[in-house]
Image (cartoon, grey):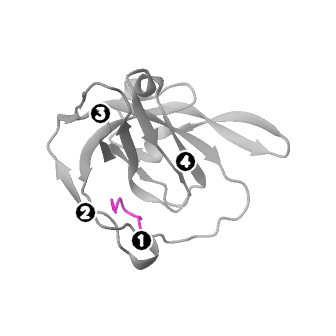
């Protein structure tokens, strides 16, 4: 299945097609859109309380995987991982994760990131319930979409601490 990707060349944007199955595993055919791929929640992690979060000292809040479906209470924050996983090999795409509109329509705020060409593994993102109502998060819920950006030229390979889907 082909999807358009963003090709940033000079001062203009254009799109070209590529096979989603070459870079993503566990993708459902009907989740492939014209310029993005809808991704599904596979795991959800509750974030615990700690005295102080200090990333410089490696102090992060405790987290624990919760059973899905999970009721996200008003004001609650969780970290999700997708069923789909990125496997780029030697391909050169940056991956931009964006919330789907259904998320903000029901009061969810999605915290996302940009993944470089070296990333391999599931996509991790944050979910905050800003609504006054509890929201049920089920396995397979489609709350985010992934767009691919073609990288021109040489890519500097980096290794980061969250390679492979580390949560915290």
Does residue 162 belong to the magenta stretch? yes
Distance (Cα) linking label 1 and label 2 = 13 Å
Q: Give the percent coordinates (x, y) of residue 133.
A: 28, 24
Element assignment for label 1: loop
Name which residue lies at 24% across and 28% down.
134
SS of the residue at dot 4? strand
First of labels 3, 1 by sequence position: 1
Residue at the extreme bottom of the image, as rendered: 57
- Check residue 20 in the rendering and tell me which mark sits there, or answer none: none
| Image marks 3 and 2: residues in contact by CB distance under 8 Å | no
The answer to whether 114 is drawn above or below residue 162 in the figure is above
Within 10 Å of disc 3 (Cα), the crowding (few <14, some 14-19, many 20+) is some
Badge 3 marks a residue whose secondary structure is: loop
Q: Which of marks 3 and 2 is nearer the N terminus?
A: 2
C-alpha separation, residue under disc 3 versus residue under disc 1 = 26 Å
Residues in magenta? 161-168
Q: Nearer the viewer, mark 3 or mark 2?
A: 3
Q: What element carries label 2?
A: loop
Q: What residue would you read off at disc 3?
A: 74
**Which residue is at the far left?**
67
The Cα atoms of the two marked residues, 2 and 4, are separated by 28 Å
Say if mark 3 contacts mark 1, CB within 8 Å: no
Q: Position of residue 145 (x, y in %)?
A: 47, 34
Which residue is the site of mark 4?
95
Mark 4 vs mark 1: give the one in front.
Answer: 1
Q: Residue at x 41, y 64 (%)?
A: 162
Marking on residue 54? 1
Name the residue located 30 percent from the left edge and 38 percent from the top edge: 41
Q: Distance from label 3 to label 2 (Cα)?
A: 20 Å
The numbered disc on residue 62 is: 2
């Amino acid at each position: 299945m082909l999807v358009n990707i963003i090709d940033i060349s000079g001062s203009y944007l254009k799109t070209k097609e590529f096979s989603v199955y070459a870079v993503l595993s566990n993708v459902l055919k009907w989740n492939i859109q014209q310029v993005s791929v809808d991704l599904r929640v596979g795991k959800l992690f509750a974030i615990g309380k700690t005295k102080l979060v200090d990333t410089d000292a490696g102090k992060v809040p405790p987290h624990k995987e919760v059973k899905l479906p999970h009721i996200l209470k008003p004001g609650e924050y969780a970290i999700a991982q997708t069923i789909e996983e990125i496997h780029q090999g030697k391909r050169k795409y940056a991956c931009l994760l964006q919330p789907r509109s259904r998320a903000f329509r029901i009061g969810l705020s999605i915290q996302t990131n940009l993944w470089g060409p070296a990333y391999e593994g599931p996509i991790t993102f944050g979910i905050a319930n800003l609504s006054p109502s509890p929201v049920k998060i089920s396995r397979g819920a489609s709350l985010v979409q992934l767009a691919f950006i073609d990288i021109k030229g040489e890519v500097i390979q980096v290794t980061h601490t969250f390679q492979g889907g580390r949560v915290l």
